[in-house]
Amino acid sequence: MKIKICGLTRLVDVEAVNALKPDFVGFVFAPTSKRRVTPDQAAELKRALDPAIEAVGVFVDETPENVAKLLDDGVIDLAQLHGSEDDVCLQELRQLTTKPIIRAFRVRSEQDVLDAEKSPAEHILLDAGAGTGTTFDWSLLRKVRRPYFLAGGLNLGNIDAALELNPYAVDVSSGIETDGLKDQKKMAEFVAAVRKKDIK
């Protein structure tokens, strides 16, 4: 089970994840997000990040050119498209970079899940919304055959139930925060809960 810790904004957050060794971290570039970082801030965080941990850039309706530049400059390793981007946008981005793409889908019905499974992106992410910190109806995932990132409202209280769905990866952000900032204790407890499942 892979782990993504999203929404890092400070060097102290990077120091914490370097010790915990999740598989992915997320840098949010969406202008309206309270966890937004600039490309320069993300580059500084990436320089401090353990090279074994992949950095994901989270974008909402950003131009393919700007996304590709951050990928090709090595600021991020994967791009997560979390807005209204469609397959045409994906194709435009592929013409600019060969780096992997995660396409996020807001799940409200079985049709949303079916649409996600057909995506040409390397990875799909299933979420309740765009960083709302809420869960969705996980029963809609019973028929999913394609590996997926599970996001939206994950925390220590529901991670065991989330792991029973056997997603490819779990993606956490607000669920490991206190007063809007990453909480090292919660981060460690969340990672330990996922790793405990792996041992079983």
Image: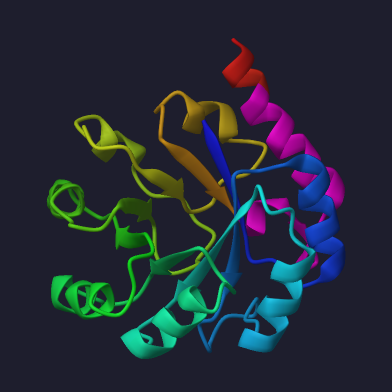
Observer-nearest of 30 and 127: 30
The residue at 25%/58% (across/down) is 121
Residue 157 visible within the image: yes
The residue at 70%/66% (across/down) is 8
Vertically, is 21 above or below 55? above
The residue at 50%/28% (across/down) is 163
Quadrant including the C terminus:
top right
- Whether residue 6 appears in magenta in the rendering, the answer is no
Observer-nearest of 79 and 84: 79
- Whether residue 174 appears in magenta in the rendering, the answer is yes
Vertically, is 41 above or below 111? below
Give residue 93's quadrant in the image.
bottom left
The residue at 47%/74% (across/down) is 71
How far across and down, in percent of the image, does residue 146 sit?
24, 37
Q: Is residue 4 left or right of residue 196?
A: left
Vertically, is 199 above or below 165? above
How far across and down, in percent of the image, does residue 136 sit?
38, 49
Which SS does the magenta portion mostly show? Answer: helix
Q: Which residues are magenta?
A: 173-195
Residue 38 visible within the image: no
How far across and down, in percent of the image, does residue 40 sit?
68, 87
Q: Is residue 151 left or right of residue 198?
A: left
